[in-house]
Every structure is written in structure tokens, then in C-alpha cells.
Image: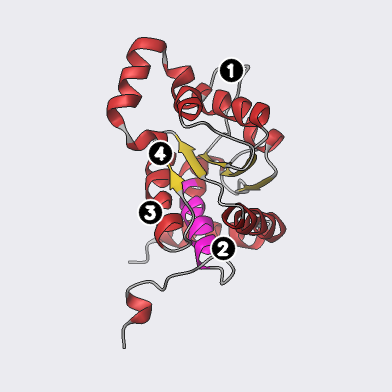
Amino acid sequence: MENLFANSYLLEAQKIIEQLDAGQIEEMTKLLVNLRNQKGRLFLVGVGGGAGHASHAVNDFRKIAGIESYSPSDNVSELTARTNDEGWETTYAAWLKVSNLSAKDMLFVFSVGGGDAERNISANIVNALKLAKETGCKIIGVVGRDGGFTAKVADACVIVPTVNKDYITPHTESFQAMVWHLLVSDPRLQQMSNKWESQK
């Protein structure tokens, strides 16, 4: 029997691809090339699925694109200590301060809503973004819905369009992975071939 859910989900994915802003991806690529040229660092942040994406993307930007990259959520001991002692809202900003975030660095956000200061949603991402703005470092992101605080302050931001309100999160997180893999595969950024592409 035909799986109607799989068909509809894939059709929605096709609609998202058709609506993605390639111009924003191009701007992100140029910013990342410039970041590497000036030997800046890339800091990737997210919560939940976005934190998992950040960890995976750190590997890809370091290994494939040759960009010095880090994610604060990779250090669970520090993350939980800061949450316990100082509160969740400041975890990422405090980590970035100790890392001496500077104007030559970049913050990359993976978030479904993009953060919302007024409603206290993803407050640790919002505070990391505020610190990035104060520091003068570049900000990029891949987010869903209307992009939230990330889209308001980013230098380049891909907003995954909502084509079905029942699947905003899985669609957004799926395309976050697609966009960062696209970025590290761009010939201007890719410095090392992937394992299977290099096999005969």
C-alpha cells in the first residue's frame, strides 16, 4: 500500500527547496571564506536538535573546510555547571566570553524559532547573539518560522519556509543539515575531499 505520509512529507520538502533563499546561502559562503582568510573562529550554537547539529557541523567545518570551529554544548561538564550555578540563560554567552569572542570571529545559530527575548524562548541563544552584536563579530544562522531574534540581528540568515505548520521543527532541522553540508561542499570552502568521494 502506498505510504501517503512519506509522499506528502517529501512533497513538502520539495516546496521548501524551491523557496530557500540561495542569495542568503551565497552571502553566508562569502562570510565564511572571509572568516577563514582572516583566521577567525566559528562558534556554533543550538539547543536540542540544534545542539546536535552544532556538534556535527563543528566536525565538518574543521575537517572539510579548514575553519577553526567550536560549540559550547560539546562540553557537557561546563554547560551543566554553568546551568546549575548561574542559570541556563547565560550559559552560551559566558562560555563565549571565556573564549574571548572577538570581532574577527563568527557565531552560527541553528534554531527552529531563532530565539525570542520577550517570551524567554532559547534565552541562552538570545544572550549569545546580544554578546556577538556587542563584540562586533559576524552572525549567520539557519532558522525556521519567522527567524526570531536570529533573523533580526544576523548578517546572513536562511529562514526555512513553513509549508506545513504541523512539521515546522522536523522540516527546519532537516534543512539546517542540508544547508551546512552545502556550505562545506562549496568549492570555495571545501579543502578536503570526503572519504567516499575519494574512493575509486
Q: Nearer the viewer, mark 4 or mark 3?
A: 3
Determine the CA span between mark 2 and mark 3: 28 Å
Q: Residue furthest bottom?
A: 200
Alpha-carbon span between mark 2 and mark 1: 32 Å
As shown in the figure, which amino acid type bears the numbered disc 1?
Answer: Arg
Query: Which residues make up the magenta segment?
Result: 173-185
Residue type at the position of mark 4: Ala
Q: Secondary structure at mark 1?
A: loop
**Label 4 with label 2: CB-CB less than 8 Å:** no
Q: Which residue is mark 2?
A: 14
Q: Are marks 4 and 3 in contact (CB under 8 Å)?
A: no
Q: What residue is shown with label 1? A: 119
Q: Position of residue 91 (x, y in %)?
A: 44, 22
> Earlier along the polypeptide chain: callout 4 or callout 2?
2
Q: What residue does disc 4 label? A: 51
Q: Residues within 10 Å of mark 1 (few under 14, many from 20)?
A: few
Q: What residue occupies the far top of the structure in this picture?
A: 85
Q: Based on the displayed image, in which of its 4 quarters is residue 193 positioned?
A: bottom left
Q: Earlier in the sequence, mark 2 or mark 1?
A: 2
Residue type at tag 2: Gln
